[in-house]
Amino acid sequence: MKIEFRYEPIAQLNNSALVTYAFEGSPASSGSVERLPTESRSLLQELESAGELSGKPFECTLIHRPPGLVAARLLIVGAGKKEKLNSAQQRRLAGTAVRYLKSRGVHDMAWVVAGPESESDCIQAVIEGALLADYDADCYRTERDGQRRIDRLDLALSSAPGEEAEAARERARIVAEAQNFTRDLVNEPANRMTPALLAQRAQEMAKRFGLECQVLGPEEIRALKMAAFWAVAQGSEEPPRLIVARYAPPDAPEAPHIGLIGKGITFDTGGISIKPSENMHEQKTDMAGGATMLGVMQAIAQLNPQVRVTAVVPATENMPSGKAFKPGDVITSMSGKTIEILNTDAEGRLVLADALTYAKQLGCTVLIDAATLTGAITIALGNITTGVFGWNKEWVERVLAAASTAGEKMWALPVDEDYRDLYKSSIADLANTGGRYGGAITGAMFVGEFAGDTPWVHLDIAGTRWSNEEKPFLAKGPTGHGVRTLVQLLTNISTRGTE
Ligand code: BES
Ligand code: MN
Ligand code: ZN
């Protein structure tokens, strides 16, 4: 998508569609509609009086040959209540316009920039919304919706763009492309996204954007004594990979050194504690945490925040076989802590345990993990909100603040000593499950045991990684949820330090 700024009068723009938004209550005379010439505004007034234009969220009204405009079409997107307009809503409005137009074979559009936020925030939200909405997940259909694309987006400003506008455009493109990269990885089925193929995609990305990327195989994983990771990997014919990507700008301070650890289960059958067959195909997305971290790395390699970051992604399948680990097995994790396996389907926390230990060994001073860890988080928060966990209040707050800026919904859930009893083992240091009650919390806390005293934040994205319904502004399928928040967090650390 080619994205350009325009600042001639709106009436002169020659796009296939000019897009404005309108608020509920007075749709013909509110929102960016106000920037239209009077001829088209009076037509909108007629539509409003006839009850055909309401301004309700995401309502789309398309007018051909609009009076007073050179553009071939005028699209009015309902923006809902005026008080509720913010960057997150702008992102969705722009996305709605993109999906509406591209499904009708329109390939170029002009968006009339207006809103209560700063011009650069507006620009960033609109471009992100447009690029995210242009994505479709049907890449293996021979006649795919995804072939219909918006290839030109003009942003109609009221005056010539300054440096801030240019920077916002660049930042938005980088962030949205990174999020779409994550969505591509999550979307791949397990036969096309084995641990080796995930590692290959990581290496290609790293090479393209100038990051260092190291990939360890089975022998190296065993030599590092990653027995918890190995326990999960041993049942699969597909050899595991440990992906390590480094971003270390020469002038960045030694600390904090952020470790981004992402669960990379390329398919989770449950192992010997096998999952029911219904919906098992959804477990192709069980590497979404790893894909999130690779997306974040792709973005920061281009944005250049002054902060050290190392991504660690343990990638393997979780399969039942004659070589698979079994309930009752006791393993000695890389940290030295022993773990009794009560359920082979609680595999994410095992691979994360060793990956966290390794990240600490690599010098990380803050650990952030993202994982499709538990079904329980979807019971608690649905598909809308990511669960955030951690003992360190300051870092949890930083993540929540970044999420709010980035327009991703995240909510802190508790960790508490009293839950520890739930995953005690009668034979080893820890058991790998804590039962059904509070399952997202005990899962998180199990992972946290391996962070030790290092500040740690866990994101459970099992609910948010995928959208089962198509939204007006987003295709059904992988969401890339979490990428924008973590990129924002790293940017915040770079500009504000850790005080
Ligand atoms: N990968 C699953 C979690 C999951 C569920 C992701 C649904 C996406 C959609 C995870 O490995 C798992 O199986 N968790 C178990 C843990 C239990 C055995 C303690 C769960 O949530 O049932
Ligand atoms: Mn599992
Ligand atoms: Zn899993």
Image (spheres, rainbow, N blue to C red):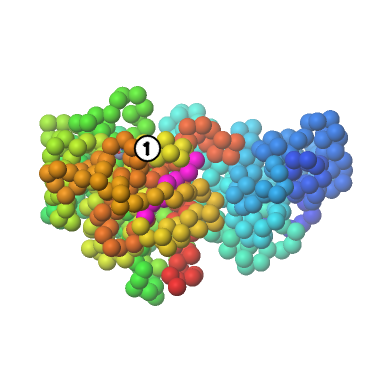
Mark 1 element type = helix
Report the residue at 33% width, 29% height from top.
280
Disc 1, ligand 1: is the CB inside 8 Å? yes
Residues 214 and 207: in front is 214
Residue 388 colored in magenta in the image: yes
Report the residue at 19% width, 31% height from top.
272
Q: Position of residue 15 (x, y in %)?
A: 71, 45
| Quadrant of the rendered image containing residue 96 | top right
- Classify 349 as above or below 405: above
Residue numbers of the magenta segment: 384-390
User: Mark 1: which amino acid?
Assistant: Ala
Q: Position of residue 263 (x, y in %)?
A: 31, 47
Residues 160 and 179: in front is 179
Count of all numbered marks drawn on residues in the image = 1
**Which quarter of the figure is the C terminus placed in?**
bottom left
Q: Is residue 456 visible?
A: yes
Q: Position of residue 376 (x, y in %)?
A: 37, 37
| Quadrant of the rendered image containing residue 108 | top right
Report the residue at 87% width, 41% height from top.
42
